[in-house]
Structure formats: C-alpha cells, structure tokens
Image: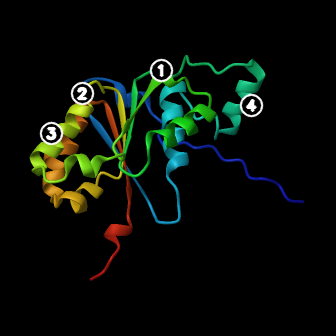
Amino acid sequence: MSSIQKQELVLFSDHSVISQQLFLGEHHNIIFLTHRLGTSSSWLINALVEANILGTPYSLNESSSAATTKTGARSSRDSVKTPVAIASFIHEATHFGASLNKLNIDSSRFEILDLLTDFVARNLGKPSDKILSELLQRFAACSGTILLEQPELLMSLFCISSDELHLKFITPLAKKCSLLVIVSSVEGFDNEF
C-alpha cells in the first residue's frame, strides 16, 4: 500500500534548476541559500553544479535519471555550459572534488578554490581591505557561476562589518560573474541577545 512519492528539484518557472535566463545579457544575479546547523547544503551545492554543467541534476531528478538510462548517456544539449567555481570557508577542496567525482562530473568543467586551508594563518594581522582584495584576486578567472560557502565567517575572523563585506567583496564578486550563489548558515543570525 505504500508508494514512494517522486519529486523533482525545480527552482525556476521554466522548470529548471538553473535557468538559462540567468546567463543572458549583461546581468549579474545572486542566489542566497541558507541552512541550519544539523542540515547539510552540500547536496544542493552538488545539484546546482550538476545542473549548471549538465543542464539538470541527474543525481536527483527521477525523470532525468530515467532519460539517462534510456539513452545511455547524459545529454548536455540543454546544459548552461558556463564555467563553475566553488569556494568554501568551511570545506577543503577535497570535499567538493570527491562529491562531484562521484557524480561523474568532468573535473575540467569546474574549479575549486580552497579558502579554508591556512586562510587565517596567511591573513592574520593584514588589514581587512588587503584580505578582501586578495580574495577577489583568487576569483580573477571566474566568469560564469561562483558558489561561495559561508563568506559571513570573514566578519568574525577579521572583524569585518557586514557593510564592508558586502561592498568590498560580495558586490565586486557578483560583478565578475553571471551568477553568484551564496550559501550561508542562519545559526549566527538567530541568536537573540
């Protein structure tokens, strides 16, 4: 009597996860994803990368998986085909590399910027302007989609205000790419003092 509910990940009205409309013209778009402690946003980050590179998140969407099985190969004809850069302040590069390799995504289609390893040690004592400027330089070659995980940690690590973070890092970063996806934990914002 039990039946399994089948659901597909669809975020835009054109029934896509990453709409082609986000990459048309000279627009710069930002998507802000939040999560809570105890939940992981990694599955959604992986799905967004997969959708950006392959056109749909085959690992999640049932009809896409069935179509893949029937045709025997993943078609990239509907693919957004933009370069993807993934940067995280809480996960090492190997975290995303291993996840995306399990999804059989060609590693030449994405770049992982490790912002965790030795980041604080390399930047301790530097002025915040220099830290943010050097961070922006790390994204110099990124023009398609950038997924940035937990940039709000910069505020507590280096006493940077939210205005400074936004004006000197987030806004210039968004202007470098067609789509900036910011993944953030809401736990730091839920505290009532």
Tag 2 residue:
140
Which residue of the protein is positioned furthest toward the bottom in this rendering? 193
Residue at image point 51% right, 43% down: 95
- Name above or below for residue 20 compared with residue 190: above
Relative placement, left or right, of 57 versus 111 is: right
- Name above or below for residue 30 compared with residue 188: above
Q: Which amino acid does label 1 sit on?
A: Ser
Q: How crowded is mark 1: few (under 14 residues within 10 Å), some or many (20 or more)?
A: few
Does residue 115 appear in the picture of this structure?
yes
Q: Give the Cα separation between the discs numbered 4 and 3.
A: 46 Å
Q: Which of 152 and 26 is in front in this view?
A: 152
x and y percentages locating residue 85 in the rendered image: 38, 32
Q: How many labels does the image show?
A: 4
Residue at image point 55% right, 23% down: 106
Q: Closer to us: mark 1 or mark 4?
A: 1
* Residue 66 numbered mark, or none: 4
Q: Nearer the viewer, residue 34 or 153?
A: 153
Tag 3 residue:
133
* Residue 130 numbered mark, or none: none
Relative placement, left or right, of 88 versus 98 is: left
Secondary structure of residue under mark 1: helix
